[in-house]
């Protein structure tokens, strides 16, 4: 897999949630900056084999 796409939503109770479109990866954080870090961490945990680690992660979460 070369890329992974996330849908980013604002949570009703505050914060943000990112859900992988083509994967089962979901993570959340209080701020957009934290969400960027959480998405990267979740992807690296999900794809523990460097040979299949996605090269691109979309979106590059922007506020």
Image: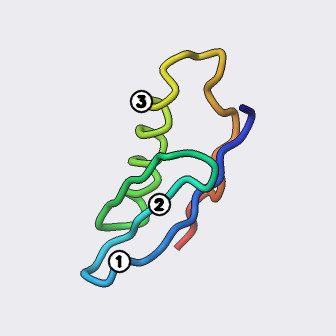
Q: Specify the label residue 40 is tagged with.
A: none
Alpha carbon separation for disc pair 1 and 2: 10 Å
Q: In the picture shown, does residue 48 fall above or below 36?
A: above
The first of marks 3 and 1 along the sequence is 1
Residue at the image position 69 percent from the left and 41 percent from the top: 56
Q: Which quarter of the picture shows residue 33? A: bottom left
* Residue at point 63%, 46% (across, down): 57
Residue 44 x/y as whole percent: 48, 30
User: In the rendered picture of this protein, how many numbered marks are placed on residues?
Assistant: 3
Q: Secondary structure at mark 2?
A: strand
**Nearer-N-terminus badge (1/2):** 1
Q: Marks 2 and 3, how far apart in space? A: 15 Å
Q: Report x, y in % for residue 55.
A: 69, 33
Find numbered disc 3 in the image and state the secondary structure of the residue it sits on: helix
| Callout 2 crowding tier (Cα within 10 Å): few <14, some 14–19, many ≥20 | many
Percent of width and height locating residue 35? 41, 57
Mark 1 — residue?
A: 11
Badge 1: how crowded within 10 Å, few (<14), some, or many (20+)?
few
Task: Give the CA separation, mark 3 to mark 1.
Answer: 23 Å
Task: Please rate how many residues cluster around mark 3, counting C-alpha atoms within 10 Å: few if below 14, some from 14 to 19, many from 20.
Answer: few
State the image quarter where residue 16 is shown.
Answer: bottom left
Picture quadrant of residue 11: bottom left
Question: Label 2, on which residue?
Answer: 18
Marks 1,2: beta carbons within 8 A: no
In which quadrant of the rendered image does the N terminus lie?
top right
Residue 45, which numbered label?
3
- Marks 3 and 1 close (CB-CB < 8 Å): no
Location of residue 62 with respect to 28 vertically, above or below: below
22 or 4, which is in the foreground? 22
Give the mark nearer the N terminus: 2 vs 3: 2
């Amino acid at each position: 897999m070369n890329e992974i796409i996330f849908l980013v939503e604002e949570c009703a109770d505050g914060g943000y949630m990112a859900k992988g479109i083509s994967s089962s990866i979901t993570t959340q954080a209080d701020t957009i900056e934290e969400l960027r870090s959480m998405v990267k961490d979740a992807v690296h945990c999900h794809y523990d084999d460097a040979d299949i680690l996605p090269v691109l992660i979309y979106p590059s979460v922007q506020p």
